[in-house]
Each structure stands twice: as structure tokens, then as C-alpha cells.
């Protein structure tokens, strides 16, 4: 800060030094002026000026040091008190700008909320004709046409469902209800949803659940399973998809294994990134790069760890590691955890 202050006051310091040199020069060329006395006066002037500079440095830099240490946010309560007219100008400008930014942020937040509500409302409205369309497809006698229409209907249904959950993810912590769940009905329900697609691609499921119960949220765990299963079905042909669970070191492990095209090793660190599809199959129009990204986004607040092991041409294995019971204190808080724990005990 001292270097900055001296640089800021360099013109004033230069003016003072120039005046002292001018006085010495006049005393030097004018024999009537005693040089010794002038040197003594110049020395005292420099001494007093140095003391003045030190005092002003301490006083003038308080405001700017406080600004430098201040965190960047809209809260104006921690703006340091101004002690000079120029500092008051800065203080007023910062306060006014912060108020304008808060107002703009509030308006943008309201606009985004309105847009989200309108989109959610639209999705719910679309579901009605979509359900009616599914009933009409079920009445078709042409099995080939029925299979193709069901597949296209399922794609629309899954995309709408993903969009619906994506808009709710920012508020997921307000929507969590942790309880003891049975894995089997959740898995079978998700398989039932995509069974037409699986039949069309010649896929079957092998399910072995040594551990059948987990602590999680029904709706959001179903969403994670849906993304993993649709991902497995999308990249597999005429093979089995294995789903198995087991207990390890006090935690439940659930794995979904397919024998599809697999993932390039260099892509593995990026598969949970938003919008990332593939470097090897970059022109695959069926990929959006959102399914695994959203699954990871949902898994984090549920304290579920998702890992993937894959080899090109050998398929992929996605592993869900569920948290231990006491780890939910971190996401529920004490009161909610006690309520949930009592609910689990019946």
C-alpha cells in the first residue's frame, strides 16, 4: 500500500522537491542570502514534510485498505466510512451501484422463476395429450407401427421428464425426503417404463440384489436410475444389462453393467460434464450430454458417489455407493434427521 500511496502522491512530492531545489538555487546565485540558513530551513521543511506524509499515509489509506479487503458482494453495510469529500463520492457511487445491481439481480431472478414456472406448467400440460397418445398407440393392431410409435413416444416422455427434473434440481434440498427404500420395485418400475425400447433392441436384464434396502429419496433415486438405464439401453444391442447390489464396509453398492460400445478412456474424466458427449463418436446426434450430468447433479446432494469403469467395445459399469446412515445429518440437519430416523424405526 505504501508504494501505491507514494505513486498516487508522486506529483505533490515532486512539486515539494522542486520548490526546495528552487530555494537552494536562489540562495546559491544570490550572495545576499545566507546559504547555511537556507539549507537549515530546507532540512526542517523536508523533515516536517516527511512527518506530514507519514501521518497522511496512515489516515488516507484506511478507507482504501478496507475496500481492498472487502469481499465482492451486494451488501453495502461493510463499505468503510468515508472521511474526505472524495471518499464520500466513492462511497456514494458504490452504494448506488450496489443498489442498482441488487435490483437488476432481483428482477432477473423473478424473470427466471416465472420462466421456470411457465415451462413446468407447459410440461404438465403436454403430459395430458402425451398420455392420450399412448393410449391410442396401445390400441393399434399393426405391431410394427405400434413398436415404432411407442419408441418415439418414449423418447418424448423421457425428454420431458428430464427437463422437468432439471428445472427442479436447483431446489432439490427443499424437496428431499430420506427414507428406507426397497430397491427392487424402483428398478423394476424403471425397466417397465423402457421395456418397449429394450424389446426393440433385443436387450434383457439380469438382476441380483443381495442388498435390497437403501436410505435415499424415492423420486430422485428413480431419476438417477432412469438416466443410467436409458444410457445403458441407448448404447447396447442384443445383450444383457446386469444390475446387482451388495454390502461393503457398511455401505450399499449398486452397479449397472452393460455390454455396449463402451467409453473411450480419455473421455472418462469428462462424462459427467454438462453437454459432453464423446470425442470418438462426436457426431452422434442421439447424445445430448445431459443424462449423466444431471444424474451426478442429483447424486451429490443425496451423498451418492457415482463411479464408472469402461473399456471400448466391452461396455460400461456404473457404480452407485450409497452413504452410511449417520452421513445424512449433513444434508438434513439435526431436527429433520431425528424426524426421519424416527420414521425409519416406525
Image (spheres, rainbow, N blue to C red):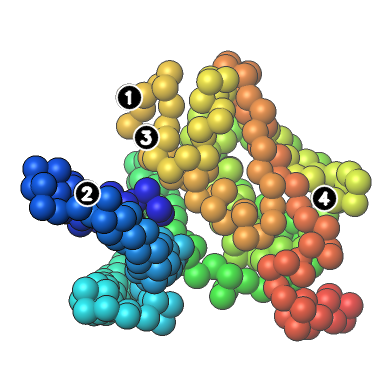
Report the Cα–Cα distance between label 2 and label 3. 92 Å
User: Which residue was labeled with disc 2?
Assistant: 35
User: Which residue was labeled with disc 1?
Assistant: 283
Q: Residue at x 57, y 20 (%)?
A: 265
User: Which residue was labeled with disc 3?
Assistant: 286
The reply to whether callout 4 and callout 2 are in contact (CB within 8 Å) is no
**Disc 4 or 1, which lies upstream in sequence?**
4
- Residue 145 can be seen in this image: yes
User: Which residue was labeled with disc 4?
Assistant: 252
Q: Nearer the viewer, mark 4 or mark 2?
A: 2
Q: Residue at x 51, y 33 (%)?
A: 270
Q: Nearer the viewer, residue 254 or 300?
A: 300
SS at badge 1: loop
10 Å crowding of disc 4: few (<14), some (14-19), many (20+): many
**Disc 2 or 3, which lies upstream in sequence?**
2
Tell me: 110 left or right of 23. right
**Whole-percent x, y for residue 147 in the image:** 42, 42
- Residue 132 can be seen in this image: no
Tell me: 80 left or right of 346. left
Amino acid at each position: 500500500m505504501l508504494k501505491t500511496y507514494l505513486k498516487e502522491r508522486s506529483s505533490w512530492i515532486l512539486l515539494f522537491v522542486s520548490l526546495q531545489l528552487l530555494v537552494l538555487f536562489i540562495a546559491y546565485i544570490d550572495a545576499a542570502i545566507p546559504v547555511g540558513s537556507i539549507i537549515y530551513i530546507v532540512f526542517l521543511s523536508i523533515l516536517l514534510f516527511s512527518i506530514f506524509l507519514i501521518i497522511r499515509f496512515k489516515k488516507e489509506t484506511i478507507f482504501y485498505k478496507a475496500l481492498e479487503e472487502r469481499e465482492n458482494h451486494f451488501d453495502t453495510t461493510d463499505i468503510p466510512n468515508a472521511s474526505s469529500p472524495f471518499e464520500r463520492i466513492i462511497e456514494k457511487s458504490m452504494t448506488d451501484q450496489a443498489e442498482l445491481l441488487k435490483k437488476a439481480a432481483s428482477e432477473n431472478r423473478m424473470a427466471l422463476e416465472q420462466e421456470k414456472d411457465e415451462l413446468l406448467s407447459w410440461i404438465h400440460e403436454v403430459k395430458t395429450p402425451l398420455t392420450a397418445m399412448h393410449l391410442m398407440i396401445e390400441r393399434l393392431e399393426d405391431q410394427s407401427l405400434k413398436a415404432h410409435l411407442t419408441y418415439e413416444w418414449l423418447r418424448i416422455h423421457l425428454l420431458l421428464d428430464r427437463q422437468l427434473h432439471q428445472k427442479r434440481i436447483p431446489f432439490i434440498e427443499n424437496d428431499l425426503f430420506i427414507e428406507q427404500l426397497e430397491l427392487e420395485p424402483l428398478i423394476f418400475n424403471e425397466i417397465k417404463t423402457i421395456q418397449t425400447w429394450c424389446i426393440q433392441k433385443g436387450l434383457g436384464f439380469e438382476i441380483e440384489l443381495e442388498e435390497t434396502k437403501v436410505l435415499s429419496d424415492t423420486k430422485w433415486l428413480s431419476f438417477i436410475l432412469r438416466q443410467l438405464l436409458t444410457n445403458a439401453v441407448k448404447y447396447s444391442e442384443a445383450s444383457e444389462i446386469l444390475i446387482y447390489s451388495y454390502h461393503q464396509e457398511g455401505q450399499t453398492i449398486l452397479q449397472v453393467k452393460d455390454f455396449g460400445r463402451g467409453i473411450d478412456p480419455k473421455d472418462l474424466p469428462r462424462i459427467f460434464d454438462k453437454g459432453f458427449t464423446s470425442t470418438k463418436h462426436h457426431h452422434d446426434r442421439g447424445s445430448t450430454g445431459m443424462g449423466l450430468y444431471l444424474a451426478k447433479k442429483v447424486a451429490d446432494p443425496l451423498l451418492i458417489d457415482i463411479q464408472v469403469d469402461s473399456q471400448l467395445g466391452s461396455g460400461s459399469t456404473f457404480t452407485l455407493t450409497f452413504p452410511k446412515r449417520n452421513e445424512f445429518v449433513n444434508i438434513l440437519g439435526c431436527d429433520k434427521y431425528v424426524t426421519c430416523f424416527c420414521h425409519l424405526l416406525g
